[in-house]
Image: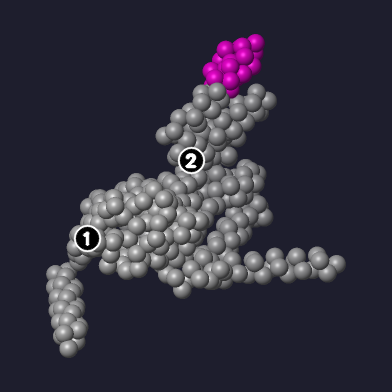
Amino acid sequence: MGFLTNNIWGFLQRAWKIAVNEPKKLMHCLKVGLALSLVSLFYYMRPLYQGVGGNAMWAVMTVVVVSEYTVGATLSKSVNRATGTFLAGALAVGVHWVATQSGDKLEPLILQASVFLLAAAATFSRFIPSIKARFDYGAMIFILTFSLVSVSGYRVQKLFKLAHDRLSTIAIGTSICILISMLVCPVWAGTELHNLIKNNMEKLSDSLDGCVAEYFGNDVKSNNTKSEASNKILQAYKCTLNSKATEESLANFARWEPAHGGFNFGHPWKEYLKVGASLRSCAYCIEALNGSSICSDAKVPDFLKTHFSKFCIRLSASSSAVLKELAVSISTMKKSSKIDVMVEEMRNAVQELENALKSLSKQQIASTETKTGDSVNDIGEGNATPAVVTLAEIVPLVTVTSLLIEIAARTEKTAEAVNGLADKAEFRVESAEKTKKSQSQKVKQISAKDEDDKTMMTLEKV
C-alpha cells in the first residue's frame, strides 16, 4: 500500500512540475475540455441534435481527433479532415448514382470496384513525399469516408442526407477547434520554431564554452565529479542534435498559420530548417570535442597545453560570441551590424591558432618518449634545446585544436544561413545611432586596453 501511495504521489509531483514549468500545456488541456463542452451541446440540446440529423457524435469525435497543441497543427488537421470528407462524400454520392443507374446486378460490382481502386490510389498517394508531409491525414480520412459512405449507400436510401450530415458535423467540430485554438491563448507553431532555433544557438554557445573550459581548466579537471550545472552545460548540445524532427514538424505546421506577431503569411519557414541543419553540424563537432577532451587517456604536457590555451580559448570565445549574436539577431528579428566584425575576429583567431600549430617544428616531435623542456618559451623560438614531445602526447591537443577550427568554419556557415533568413524574412536593420554607439564603445575599449598595455610595459621597465 505504501509503495502504491509513493508512486501516486511521485506522479502527482511530476504532473505539477510540468504544469508549473510549461503552463501552455496546461492551458491546452483546458482548451480541449472547453471545445468538447461546446460541441456536446449539439448532443444534449434537442433542437441542435435534430438540426444535424442525430449525427452529433461525429462532431465530438472530430474535436477529439483534430485538437492539437499548436494553431498550425489544428489548422492542418482541420483542413485535411474537412477536405478529405468533402471530396470522399462527393465521389461516393457520384459513384452511388452511377451504380444505381446500372441496374441491380452491376450495382454491387461497381461499388466494390470503386472502393478498391480509389482506396488503393489514395493509399499509394500517402507514399509520395510531398503529399505525406502535408496531406497524409486528409488521404486517410478520404479512404475512411469514401468506404463508409459507399458501403452504407447500398443499404441506406437517403445517401445524400447521410453525406451532408457527416460533412456538417465535421464542419461544426473543426470550426469550434479552430476558433478556440486561435482565440484562447494561442500557441503558434511559427513562434515555437523561432524560439527553438534561438534557444539551440544559445545552448551550443554554452556547450562550446563549457567544453573548452573543461579541457583547459585545471581546477575543473582536478574534480572527479562534475557539478550538475556544469554537466547540463556540457550536454546542452544534445538538444540541438535531437531537434530535427521537431523543427521539421513545426515548419510544416507553421505554413498553415495566418500572419501573427512579426511573421507574415508566407514567411520563409524553410530557411529555419537550413539554420537548424547548420547548427546540428556545429553540434556534431562539439560532441566530438566533448568526447576527445574528456575521454582522452593520453596526457598532454602542461607547457603545451598552457601555450595553446590562450589561442583555443580566444577562438572558442569568438565562435561563442558569434552564435550568441546570431541568437540575438533571430530573437529581435533585426540584422546585426556587428556580425561581420565578429566573424572577422573569429577568422583572425583561427589564423593565430593555425600559426601556433605551425610553430611546432618537426624537430619537436620524436618517435620515442624523451625529456620535455621546462619552459613554454622553448616552442618556436629556436632555442638550442627545444622541447621534444612524443607524437602520442601531441595528438589529443591537435585533435582539439582541429575541432575548434572546424567549429569556427561551421559557425561561419551558420552565420551565412542566418543572413539568408534575414534577407528573405526582411529583418529590420539596426538603427544608425545604435551602430555608432557600439562602435564608439569598441573604440573606448581598445583605447583603454592600449593604455593598460603601456602601463604594464612601464612597470616592467621599472
Q: Residues within 10 Å of mark 2 (few under 14, many from 20)?
A: many
Q: Is residue 31 left or right of residue 266?
A: right
Density class for disc 1 (Cα within 10 Å; few <14, some 14-19, many ≥20) is: few
In this view, the residue in front, 4 or 361, is 361
Q: Is residue 310 magenta?
A: no
Label 1 secondary element: loop
98 versus 261 height, above or below = above
Q: Which residue is mark 2?
A: 80
245 vs 139, nearest the viewer: 245
Residue 437 x %, y % = 16, 76
Give the position of the N terminus as an image quadrant: bottom right
Q: Is residue 426 left or right of residue 40?
A: left
Q: Residue pushed farthest bottom?
A: 462
Residue drawn at x 55%, y 44% is 170
| 115 is within the stretch colored magenta | yes
Left or right: where 278 falls relative to 80: left
Q: Earlier in the sequence, mark 2 or mark 1?
A: 2
Q: Is residue 29 left or right of residue 175?
A: right
Residue beneath disc 1: 382
Q: Nearer the viewer, residue 45 or 152?
A: 152
Amino acid type for the residue under numbered disc 2: Asn
Find residue 382 and report its horizontal and vertical position in percent: 22, 60
Q: Circle 2 — which element? A: helix
Q: Residue lying at the far front in this picture: please name it.
A: 384
The relative height of residue 384 versus residue 403 in the rendered view (above or below) is: below
